[in-house]
Image: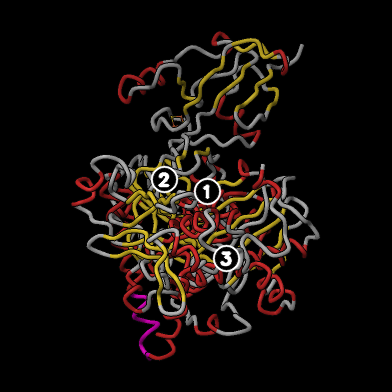
Amino acid sequence: HKDPLVLFMPSGKRGRFPVGTPVLDAARSLGVYVESVCGGRATCGRCQIEVQEGNFAKHKIVSSNDHISPVGPKEQRYASVRELPDGRRLSCSAHILGDLVIDVPQDTVINAQVVRKAATDRVIERNAAVQLCYVEVDEPDMHKPLGDLDRLKVMLEKDWGWKDLLIAPHLIPQIQGILRKGNWAVTAAIHRDMDSSRPFIVGLWPGLKNEAYGIACDIGSTTIAMHLVSLLSGRIVGSSGTSNPQIRFGEDLMSRVSYVMMNPDGREAMTKAVREAVNSLIGKVCAEGEVDRHDILDMVFVGNPIMHHLFLGIDPTELGQAPFALAVSGALQYWAHEIDIDVNRGARLYMLPCIAGHVGADAAGATLSEGPYRQDKMMLLVDVGTNAEIVLGNKDRVVAASSPTGPAFEGAEISSGQRAAPGAIERVRIDPETLEPRFRVIGVDKWSDEEGFAEAAASVGVTGICGSAIIEIVAEMYLSGIISQDGVVDGAMAAKSPRIIPNGRTFSYLLHEGEQRITVTQNDIRAIQLAKAALYAGIKLLMEKLEIDHVDTIRFAGAFGSFIDPKYAMVLGLIPDCDLDEVKAVGNAAGTGALMALLNRGHRREIEQTVNKIEKIETALESKFQEHFINAMAMPNKVDAFPKLSQ
Ligand code: FES
């Protein structure tokens, strides 16, 4: 005669428990994460579970609602006041009577669209660093002169098992008031992921406090993207982005470093600007989620090394020159207010580790999100910006490098280049016979050769080419024979098409003649060649390091990757040969990684350990870089084959 067997999904953890054990206790003892704020008093409603009915032959379990205790008076009371969705039970009040399969609902966290296209859906198992704990503290007693805080700690240990608690000093003067206001019942926020291994009381409220929020933020050089998440349900309640105000100090990263070098107050001014932007973005996501910013208790940030330094108030000058020394590469923790972030006074801020001088906490976030180190497949992860951050590997070994692609992929240095905004050409096809183009413009719902395009485009105009479209145009020019393998516009074509026009000693391709003349010049093509050669050479170095000649799967992180068509990236040889189905854009993967680290503190240790193991390669020091670079100037490459392209 054995005790009932209980299986928890989705974790798959299982164990036997005596009849009468509360389901919550069973979950706890197996390390299955089920939220609870009230400590089993059936008042917070956070501990919801569902029984899966059926015969789970594989697990030798027949699970049924008869194997759980019926709804009792406490649960009944909760359901009548707060309402419990159909089929849900409070695991603190439901007792095990027989074999059970229990579903712990995980709110799906959707990687909300920071760029135009939504990226992947995924479920992040919750195990937040902050936990809310309701306790009823003994009233003061003249015969036992233990202080208010000390009696609070006693109860937090008795009811919740917290030992050796520390407390944020700002709370100490408030304790008396809060305890009395709550009539000795209070909710404490415990942060259990501080630098010291001891748990920390970071917040205290009278009565039952049933909500706590967190922020995941990616500070990009151009855009700052943020999610506001409920730490208790895992639900994203607000997502927003704003442009990085540091742009006024310099478009790209290096110009911002120069600004710091040239101006005595430059670093301070940029730090202030980015922190202000973060604060106002918090206001925005809080308004969206109808959340009080003082309910934000935990934050996770990622950013490239220079953004990382400037946000934290560190001089980035060293990152502008060899040996590209980071002031600090490991993960960091602060009180949010130390970084001037205006949220709860007890909120913590966690910054992911940087991988190398040019491969930042954003790349670490993307690595955590896509997890090359979790799989057998050889994964190439690329985040293209002014610098391309490249991570390559699988569960055996991971290497990383950055490549100086320059801003061409972002549309800078391109004669008709512009940011992705209404009016920008975003898709192009060139007829190989007539060399006539057709294209799509952001904000216009038609191809340029469709009826009514001119009227539809009248309001936004056709103003330029966005960075991702330039890849497509150059690839289409190559496919239609307008440019040679070496990237030279064939002047002889001018006889065949009026689209090929002389431009000094070279030729350009006329894409659109309207209010603005949009052409692709020989210089534009050069700029793209240089950028793509740098990217490919970096990738090639990493492949050589791992002694591999192909990759199984490719992930494009970042805004750029969301817009480019993998086929065109491969036609131009930006990326090595790979099954086209295995080339995917993953959107703001750095932000997703931040979200994972926010919702599950286990992911913080995971990425810290992974980053320690990643082998960093400095492309500038590798003698083969130049050779790979020159070969990669050709389309798609002088020496490397792309067999998958012809399939
Ligand atoms: Fe609060 Fe169950 S733990 S309702």
For the residue marked with disc 1, what is the amino acid? Ala
Mark closer to the chain start, 3 or 2: 2
- Which mark, by number, is residue 362? none
Q: In which quarter of the image is the N terminus?
A: top right
Task: Tell me residue 332's x, y (percent).
Answer: 54, 66
SS for dot 1? strand
Visual colour scheme: secondary structure
What range of the chain is rendered magenta?
A: 263-272
Left or right: residue 471 versus residue 284 is right
State the image coordinates of residue 404 (x, y, percent, origin top left). Answer: 56, 73
Q: Where is residue 464 in the image (x, y as percent from the top left)?
A: 33, 62
Residue at horizontal 32 percent and vertical 70 percent from the top? 245
Q: Is residue 390 at least partly visible in the picture?
A: yes
Q: Which quadrant would residue 29 be assigned to in this image? A: top right
Of residues 248 and 165, which is closer to you in this image? 248
Mark 2 to mark 1: distance in Å? 10 Å
- Mark 2 Cα shell of 10 Å, populated few (<14), some (14-19), many (≥20): some
The residue that label 3 is drawn on is 532
Cα–Cα span, label 3 and label 2 = 24 Å
Quarter the C terminus occupies: top right
Identify the element where label 2 is drawn: loop
Circles 3 and 1: CB distance less than 8 Å?
no
First-in-chain label (2 vs 1): 2
Kind of residue indicated by mark 2: Lys
The residue mark sitting in front, 3 or 2, is: 3
**Residue located farthest toward the right when viewing the structure as drawn:** 547
Q: Name the residue under label 2.
A: 117
Q: Are marks 3 and 2 in contact (CB under 8 Å)?
A: no
Task: Say which of 583 and 185 sits in front.
Answer: 583
What residue would you read off at disc 1? 585
